[in-house]
Image (spheres, rainbow, N blue to C red):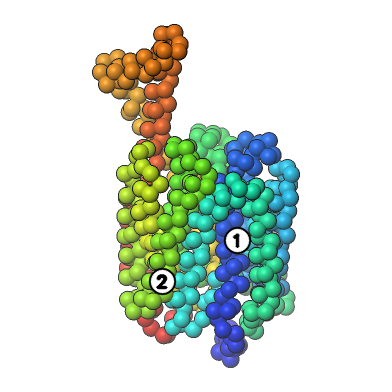
Amino acid sequence: MTESIAQQEKWEFKINPWITMIPIMAAIFMYIIDETISNVSLPYMAGSFSVSRQESTWIVTCYLVSSGIMIPAVDFFCKLFGRKQFFLISIVIFTVASLLCGLSTSMPMIIFSRILQGIGGGGIMPIGQALIFEIFPKEKLPAAMAVFGLGIVLAPIAGPVLGGWITENWSWHYIYFINIPIGILTYYLSVLYIEEPPYSRRQPGVKMDYSGFFFLALWLITLQVVLDKGNDADWFNAEWICQLFTVSVIAFFAFVFIQVKKMKTGNGLIDLSVLLNKNYFFGTLGQVIMVALMLSSAAFLPSMLQNLMGYTSYLSGLSMVPRGCGCLLASLLVGIVLPILGARVFIFIGIFMLGLGSFVFGFINLQIALTNIALPNFLFGFGMVLAMVPLTNISCTTLRNEQQTNAAGLQNLLKNVGGAIGTSIATTMISRFAQVHQMMLIDGLTETNKVYMDKLHVITSAFAQHYDIATATMMAKGQIYNILLQQSTLWGYIETFRFFALATVILIPIVFLLKDDSKKSQTVD
């Protein structure tokens, strides 16, 4: 440990950190955008492969699972190959897998390609985050983290917009082909501008934690299947969901037990001792909750606009642009003002803005235009970056440099799991609230309700001009029922957004549990 710290003190990065930032952020943006760029293209891909829309969701799921499995193993592979070499290997695998995704002609082929793409992308995010904390001096770190935060929040937002535009104007194949020139350029710039300090080079005698890796993979795969299919199977009312969830829980505890047991020897897949750092623990907890809110809202808001309001995939993706504008403005503020006000002030304001945006979303209706959701989307993006950037910064600045790769891997694993759980909970809430409101609304469709009978008479009269009275009446009732389903589904989204606003309240106590050293130059171990 003493020798490693001495090496750190002697090592100085020679290349301008902002130049090094270019290939790092290009790789991170490319990896994150592929989490959401496929979402709006799934109906087109399902048609190409002759599968149902439900089956096509595996195109997204397998990418998330494979990258999630790789993320905590990044520290091991960095020791095995050297951090820079593994970063370059990850870029190559991701780029080649993107080519295979674009060339896919069947469902098995694209699932294999997306798994390979996730394996390549899993190493990019934690290594990039660890590098940023190392190459920037403390006085410049807030500005660097503002750029980093902008990238990780803007990429999921840009994904549906870019994916919708490419799919409608060209073909879904090109949402993967665009990664190829970016990947090649990123590889070249990484070779030139990413330096490798002594403590990040290949280490001899590194052993693979096979048992830990097995239980990690088993935990994440079974958990993802439960989260993806649970709502369709009515959750724990389905026996196979109960069985699979039991396997997932056992695998999780087995994985944690193995990692705790191997902490002393240092041969575990991940080092859980970083969780003993108070700032890291509570900072990571806050990020997990925020990522759950961000990814779940980004997943179902475009879907709501397409299903309820008839938006195209491009227009529904375009609805996320104001969120990106909020992210950009917040990034500028964080980079300039954070060293003055401190992290906790920004986190608190960001949480408030995030809750306010969710609260405003809780009052939408089917008569709104695209511009009416611009304000809450802007507030959502503004609050997300305003809180997320200092939260990431404050959670990792108290760790030593040699801990950064492991800490970033564990943090990103937990954020991935949090995002998956949050999206699944939001989907279930929408479905359940829609059912509740459907039962409430259907009570009003009776012959004693004058408003209902007047509406039924008007619609029946319109249909009676072309059909007999019995058919016209049946069609009128069907149309009213469709309106009822539409309104009850809308209420499902409204109630979910209001719970999002309530969830931000949970984040407030975390702010007071963090030690803010953002205005100091010292590092706390």
Amino acid found under the numbered disc labelled 1: Tyr
Q: Residues within 10 Å of mark 1 (few under 14, many from 20)?
A: many
Identity of the residue drawn at 44% across and 38% down:
309
Kind of residue indicated by mark 2 = Leu
Q: Residue at x 54, y 63 (%)?
A: 412
State how far apart marks 2 and 1 are (Cα): 23 Å
Give the labeled residue for mark 1. 31
Closest to the observer, 267 or 428 = 428
Helix, strand or loop status at disc 2? helix
Q: Picture coordinates of residue 180 (x, y %)? A: 69, 61
Mark 2 vs 1, N-terminal side: 1
The residue most toward the bottom is 10
Relative to 181, does residue 169 appear above or below in the rendering?
A: above
Q: Nearer the viewer, residue 174 or 280?
A: 174
Quarter of the picture containing the N terminus is bottom right
Instruction: Indicate left or right for 353 with 127 as reference.
Output: left
As drawn, the label of residue 332 is: 2
Vertical arrangement, residue 349 with respect to residue 144, above or below: above
Q: Is residue 240 left or right of residue 356?
A: right
Horizontally, residue 500 falls left or right of residue 193, namely: left
Q: Position of residue 270 (x, y in %)?
A: 59, 67
**Relative height, residue 464 to residue 408 (above, below):** above
Q: Are marks 2 and 1 in contact (CB under 8 Å)?
A: no
- In the rendered image of this protein, does residue 522 appear above or below residue 132? below
Q: Residue at x 33, y 45 (%)?
A: 362
